[in-house]
Image: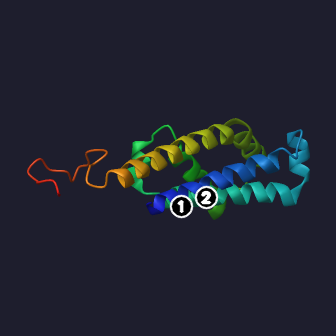
Amino acid sequence: MSNSFGFLEHMIEDCEDILFIKKQFASYEEFEKNRPLHKSIVYSMLDLGELMKSFDKDERLKYPQIPWKHIIGFRDRAAHGYKLLNLKIVWDLVELYIEVLLQELRQLQQIKINKANVEEDNPSQDTQLTPSTSFTTKPEK
């Protein structure tokens, strides 16, 4: 499988880690007071953004329902210190978007697994036309 599959697995792990840590808190106020755990969430979000940045750009374009640019943008701002990190924004992002993102990433992972299985079962058949496919090219036997 492609390198993007490995990135995808790690993105899913980061989302799962974020949600696991978030369950430790009943409120934003509790989250704000626990510096080691909110740092863990921020680190996982930074990692998630870095993985998304490294994910193949053409692949990202195929799945516009995933907010690639927004998460990469968050990562860039947080990592480079353009502003002080606002923990309320981090909390809101986790609260509103990470679970949905996790579902989207799992669906994408399943699509990639299914595609890889089809290609493995039928190595001489294309599962999808790509820009490099030409009608003048003879299929391999």
Q: Distance between the Cα atoms at labels 1 and 2?
A: 6 Å
Judged left or right of residue 116, residue 52 is right
Compare residues 124 and 60 and report the one nearer the observer: 124
Instruction: Decide if residue 1 is in sight here.
Output: yes
Q: Position of residue 129 (x, y in %)?
A: 25, 45
Residue 87 disc label: none
Specify the farthest residue to the left. 136
Marks 1/2 in contact by CB < 8 Å: the verdict is yes
- On screen, 4 above or below 69? below
Judged left or right of residue 125, residue 104 is right
Residue under label 1? 6
Residue under label 2? 10
Q: Residues within 10 Å of mark 2 (few under 14, many from 20)?
A: some
Q: Position of residue 136 (x, y in %)?
A: 8, 51
Q: How many numbered tags mark residues here?
A: 2
- Residue at figure coordinates x 87%, y 58% from the top left: 35
Please, what secondary structure does the residue beneath circle 1 have? helix
Compare residues 69 and 66 and report the one nearer the observer: 66
Quarter of the image for residue 39 reads: bottom right
- Residue at figure coordinates x 88%, y 47% from the top left: 24
Instruction: Decide if residue 82 is in sight here.
Output: no
Q: Quadrant of the C terminus?
A: bottom left
Q: Position of residue 52 (x, y in %)?
A: 53, 55
- Residue at figure coordinates x 50%, y 57% from the top left: 5
Q: Residues within 10 Å of mark 1 (few under 14, many from 20)?
A: few
Identity of the amino acid at label 2?
Answer: His
